[in-house]
Amino acid sequence: MDLYEKLVDGSEKLSLVGLGYVGMPIAVAFAKKIKVIGFDLNKQKIDLYKAGVDPTNEVGGEVIRNTKVEFTADASRLKEAKFHIVAVPTPVNDDHTPDLSPVEGASRLLGQNLTKGSIVVFESTVYPGVTEDICVPILEKESGLKCGVDFKIGYSPERINPGDKVHRLETITKIVSGMDGETLDTVAKVYELVVEAGVYRAESIKVAEAAKVIENSQRDINIAFMNELSIIFHKMGIDTKAVLEAAGTKWNFLKFFPGLVGGHCIGVDPYYLTYKAEQLGYHSQIILSGRRINDDMGKYVAESLVKNLIKTDIPVKGAKVAILGFTFKENCPDTRNTKVIDIYKELGEYGIRPVVVDPAADADEAGRLYGIEFHEIKEVRDMDAVVIAVAHSGFLELSREDIAAFFNPAHKVKVLMDIKGLLDKKDYQEDYLYWRL
């Protein structure tokens, strides 16, 4: 029997290395079909999973309580598995160069527990060449095994969208690749166990790596164009959302919208591609231009808020400002790489210390990473300005009366910054200086 058949009949196990927003749903999905070991270095996270708690809110506590995943923080248990999936983050350093330490560390740990006959599939977003040129040598060194002889490798980029209940592992076509035809066939068949939408067999590992990194780079560039349009139209006194709605009536107009671009994919992946390009002597023009625009949007929002305070004769220094939403995207507790922090910090430069409210966010994480303590929404009173920064579903339920109650009643004009354009602009034409990207 080959490895695929052994996985199906239960004589071999699959391991998932890294149980975050991406890895954990993958482990849960496979556990419905085959035996799965779910490994993460974070023992506290593992203890939560074992207790039936889902800190990511990706699948929910009930699913975690009923899953057959064998959760562990003991790396030696990886020796029990023959098919390994590595799904650890690939962030960037402060200078925007790739930080490969998580994927290198995972490769070391896995290499120390790798056995003959294994297949290792990386899911982390990387620039073309990382799997074969960086991860494989680490696996070989730590295991004493030879790639292509004692173990095989593949690459299958994750496309899970955190917080999205529609576009899930099962419903998105999965790109798969392998170092040779036999490996590709096995990797494809294993993923076909859980991916109902089917798999796409890339012709090489580097092609699969490149496909993933350009998916998010393309989206980043399109959003940057929308953000630049927003800046231009504000100077013209034109409502950007109204322009996009009009333009969107054409059949081939791409419906992107301006906004803060954070998270671990769209705001990071382009830097992986441009880093590799620069190593080869090519300096990116379009990609890095888009990155600069998107990286500056938090500062732009804060500056616009200050200008609006001045317009309404409200003193800037010491102004009471509330920021509703802090996560990098809606309905997701993850605050890592959120661009809302840029608004917070920039307002601090003007002597404003905002009150931050986010009932969906991981409060412990925000405190640890940013030193920010969240407030209850009932504490948002007597404000000089309010920024709705994230489109959480809970904020969509706020009525006009709820929003009015946030402000200092002495203000004849209320400064309301609706970054995502959640509200109906017509409802806030009187008594408000309403602003949206």
Image: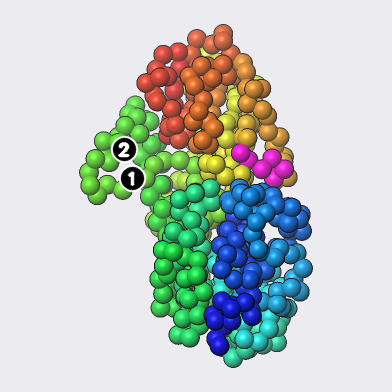
Is residue 323 visible to us here?
yes
Q: Is residue 132 above or below residue 61?
A: below
Q: Amino acid at mark 1?
A: Lys
Q: Are marks 2 and 1 in contact (CB under 8 Å)?
A: yes
**Quadrant in which the N terminus appears:** bottom right
Residue sitting at 71 percent across and 63 percent down? Answer: 71
Find residue 420 and report its horizontal and vertical position in percent.
45, 35
Q: Earlier in the sequence, mark 2 or mark 1?
A: 2
Residue sitting at 74 percent across and 64 percent down? Answer: 72
Magenta run includes residue 362: yes
Bounds of the magenta segment: 360-366
Residue sitting at 58 percent across and 58 percent down? Answer: 25
Q: Depth check: 302 or 437 in front?
A: 437
Q: Mark 2 falls on what kind of element?
A: helix
Find residue 349 and report its horizontal and vertical position in percent.
62, 32
Q: Residue furthest bottom?
A: 149
Q: Which mark is residue 244?
A: 2
Q: Which mark is residue 255?
A: 1
Find residue 63 and report its horizontal and vertical position in percent.
61, 53
Is residue 353 visible to us here?
no
Label 2: few (<14), some (14–19) or many (≥20) C-alpha neighbours in 10 Å: some
Q: Is residue 126 above or below residue 333?
A: below
Q: Depth check: 184 or 257 in front?
A: 184
Q: Depth check: 112 or 25 in front?
A: 25
